[in-house]
Amino acid sequence: MKNLLIMGAPGAGKGTQASLIKNEYQIAHISTGDMFREAMSNQTPVGLEAKKYIDNGLLVPDTITVKLVEERLQKDDCKNGFLLDGFPRNISQAEALDKMLASSGIKLSGVINIQTDDLVLIDRIVGRRTCPVCKEGYHITSKKPKVENVCDKCGATLVQRADDNVETVSNRLKVYHEQTAPVLDYYKKQGLVIDVDGMQDINDVFKEITKKLGDNK
Ligand code: ADP
Ligand code: ADP
Ligand code: ZN
């Protein structure tokens, strides 16, 4: 059983790899970004509050985010393993996660770190398209759908995320380097980090991940 984290800069390929890993290892994929987008589209109190930060490329406050993750990890589908994508994003979230897991007697199996050059991230983010129905991710050049702007899996029209614009990207990168990158050192000290070269093609990144994770499902 695997209890994993996937980390990397915005646009590094976390969501793309998470969806492949989830199928391969049959574990729950928990994306805080997806959860916030769902809450925003349903205009829930959490969604309305989160929108103020997300639109500006800033982190949603820890009190809101930690509670959301804590509730999600208690659901039954996490009992066979999980993959957290986009959380923790700062040291205080990492400490909160450690407490949550310790109190349930759960140990992390590894932290997948997708390494990229900042130079490719803007293109990946601005060219990103997403299926609003099944959440499958696409890219206008590196992962084109068979029919332009239509989801291969479910036929829905693809959308562009509101925060995927050049203006918020620089803030999101700054937040990543200042607040999220230190989380990697936190896990390095625990010997959990699995570095992966995120500059390869999507399938090659996935091959490197499965090779390093091993067959043990
Ligand atoms: P993240 O979840 O880290 O923000 P995504 O998985 O959504 O990143 O990927 C960002 C964009 O880049 C998407 O449009 C995706 O299709 C594309 N992408 C992901 N991995 C790669 C890769 N290895 N090479 C080229 N494009 C990629
Ligand atoms: P990216 O593809 O840029 O990595 P995500 O989909 O993971 O983005 O997150 C989108 C936005 O949602 C972030 O820029 C941030 O505002 C908010 N968010 C997601 N996860 C967290 C978190 N763990 N803590 C605070 N804010 C978060
Ligand atoms: Zn779809």
Image (tube, grey):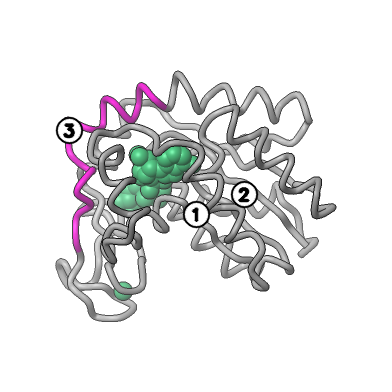
Question: Which quadrant of the view contains residue 134?
Answer: bottom left
- The kind of secondary structure element at disc 3 is helix
Position of 138 compared to 1: left or right?
Answer: left
| Residue bearing mark 3 | 166
How many angstroms separate mark 2 from mark 1 (CA)? 9 Å
Spot occupied by residue 109 in the image (x, y as percentages of width and height):
76, 48
On screen, residue 216 versus residue 133, left or right, reads right
Total of numbered circles in the picture? Answer: 3
Residue 39 place in picture, x, y as percent: 35, 60
In space, the residues marked 1 and 3 are separated at their CA atoms by: 23 Å
Mark 1: C-beta under 8 Å from nearest atom of ligand 1: yes
**What span is in magenta?**
159-175
Whether 17 is drawn above or below 147: the answer is above
Inspect the image, locate mark 1, and give the three-letter code of the amino acid beneath it. Gln
Residue appearing at x 32%, y 54% in the figure: 47
Say which mark, if any, is on residue 17.
Answer: 1
Q: Secondary structure at mark 2?
A: helix
